[in-house]
Image (cartoon, rainbow, N blue to C red):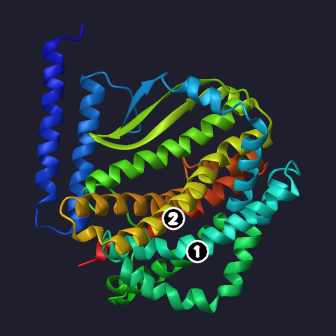
């Protein structure tokens, strides 16, 4: 039986963790070290709460499970036609014209056309402002250098990029970019190790971790991530119910004491037994929701920024601080929805992109090979962080 002493001990662990977290953020050390300390602290706290306080957990994350909200999901899933169209449109946004064979012809010309329009709008209107926002507003290190390095080549290969986008969607464009930059990093690493050059020190990391309080504003960052994961998991849940898959629970995911997302837990056994098109709709729905939300929040972000500047809200005491906080929240909602929606399409372990390919490809050796190649390129994109001075 859990008595007052149990809850007092748990509250003490949370309080000590929060104090250490605040102290870590204030240390005058490089951001990479700070990030590592926070990750180590939260990983330890997660294990303490799981092992000694009986919290549910998977892969070092704490899962606060509940059945609340499942009736709401059931209500939303009643309009089956609209949600299937939404997911089919998202398949085109994610995989371009490859979505037609991917969905085995179970998609309409209208959903493909709408998906292509949304794909081009997100790629050429929303995506170009993601990096500038993360650079100028959030001050994430090394991104500005990366932006200047990739701008010229991307313009030179614009026709190739358009062909990749239309033919293979955001999945193909991101995968090609990841693999190509992985080769750039590998070449620099070989030059550094074998020839003793300083090539790695001058190579920009191709990826970075995002953590509220470290390289994202704490309050607005947590709020944005909760919105993003609620949208993502909610879409999975709705398409799951349409496919007649029972939902076991829903809840919030914590890394230590930091909320990092939300989840809907379907009956995985029954999900694996439904036909492939239905499985694909369920799996692609998460990224579809993130990309659609990215576009919606982008519109809200632009309108709010224009209104804030026109009204001069920044100069009004208290109101200016609140307006700036909302500005950050809307900006992170559009930028991070785009990042999570696209990265989730990669064929990496635990990502929806891997499961989509695994469901639809008979050759499992090809699936595993692509996963390992993508994982290697993904890790190579992080490698330059260890050479940053």
Q: Using the rendered view, name the quadrant where residue 333 is placed.
A: bottom left
Q: Is residue 362 left or right of residue 180?
A: right
- Left/right placement of residue 322 relative to residue 298 reads left
Taking depth in this image into account, of 230 and 349 the one nearest to the observer is: 230
How far across and how far down the image is residue 346, in percent?
A: 59, 58
Cα separation between marks 1 and 2: 9 Å
Q: Callout 2: few (<14), some (14-19), or many (20+) C-alpha neighbours within 10 Å? A: many
**Mark on residue 125?**
1
Q: Measured from the top left, where is residue 352 in percent x and y?
A: 60, 48
Residue depicted at x 47% and y 71%: 130
Task: Identify the residue shown where x is 69% and y is 54%.
Answer: 367
Question: What is the secondary structure assignment of the residue under circle 2?
Answer: helix
Q: Tell me if 159 is positioned left or right of 124 in this view.
A: right
Task: Determine crowd level at label 1: few under 14, some 14-19, many 20+ residues with C-alpha closer than 10 A.
Answer: few
Q: What residue sits right under mark 2 in the picture?
A: 298
Q: Can you say whether 295 is above or below 199 in the image?
A: above
Asked whether disc 1 touches disc 2, contact meaning CB atoms under 8 Å apart, the reply is yes
> Which one is nearer the viewer's eye here, 210 or 235?
235
User: Residue drawn 79% across and 40% down?
Assistant: 81
From this view, report whether residue 111 is shown above or below residue 304: above
- In which quadrant is the N terminus drawn? top left
Q: Position of residue 58 (x, y in %)?
A: 42, 34
- Mark 2 or mark 1, which is nearer the start of the sequence? 1
Toward the top, the furthest residue is: 1
Q: Nearer the viewer, residue 156 or 237?
A: 237
Residue 296 lies, with reference to residue 51, above or below; the image says: below
User: In this rendering, does residue 216 appear at all?
Assistant: no
């Amino acid at each position: 039986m859990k008595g007052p002493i149990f809850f007092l001990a748990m509250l003490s662990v949370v309080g000590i963790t929060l104090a250490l977290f605040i102290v870590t953020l204030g240390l005058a050390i490089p951001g990479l070290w700070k990030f590592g300390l926070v990750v180590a602290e939260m990983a330890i706290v997660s294990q303490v709460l799981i092992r000694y306080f009986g919290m549910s957990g998977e892969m070092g994350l704490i899962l606060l499970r509940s059945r609340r909200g499942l009736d709401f999901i059931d209500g939303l899933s009643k309009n089956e036609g609209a949600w299937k169209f939404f997911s089919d449109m998202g398949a085109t946004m994610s995989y371009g014209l490859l979505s037609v064979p991917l969905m085995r012809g179970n998609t309409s010309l209208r959903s493909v056309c709408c998906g292509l329009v949304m794909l081009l709008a997100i790629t050429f209107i929303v995506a170009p402002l993601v990096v500038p926002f993360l650079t100028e507003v959030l001050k994430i290190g090394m991104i500005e250098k990366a932006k200047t390095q990739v701008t010229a080549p991307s313009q030179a290969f614009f026709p190739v990029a358009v062909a990749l986008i239309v033919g293979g969607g955001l999945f193909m464009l991101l995968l090609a970019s990841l693999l190509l930059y992985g080769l750039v990093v590998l070449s620099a690493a070989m030059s550094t190790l074998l020839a003793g050059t300083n090539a790695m020190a001058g190579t920009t990391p191709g990826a970075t971790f995002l953590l509220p309080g470290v390289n994202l504003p704490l309050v607005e960052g947590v709020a944005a991530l909760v919105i993003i994961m609620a949208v993502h998991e909610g879409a999975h849940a709705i398409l799951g119910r349409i496919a007649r898959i029972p939902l076991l629970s829903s809840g919030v995911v914590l890394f230590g004491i930091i909320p990092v997302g939300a989840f809907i837990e379907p009956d995985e056994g029954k999900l694996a037994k439904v036909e492939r098109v239905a499985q694909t709709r369920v799996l692609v729905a998460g990224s579809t929701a993130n990309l659609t939300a990215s576009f919606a929040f982008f519109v809200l972000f632009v309108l709010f920024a224009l209104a804030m500047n026109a009204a001069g809200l920044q100069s009004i005491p208290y109101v200016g601080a609140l307006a700036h906080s909302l500005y950050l929240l809307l900006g992170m909602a559009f930028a991070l929805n785009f990042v999570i929606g696209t990265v989730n399409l990669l064929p990496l372990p635990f990502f929806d992109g891997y499961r989509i390919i695994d469901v639809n490809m008979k050759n499992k050796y090809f699936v595993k090979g692509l996963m390992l190649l993508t994982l290697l390129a993904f890790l190579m994109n992080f490698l330059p962080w260890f050479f940053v001075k």
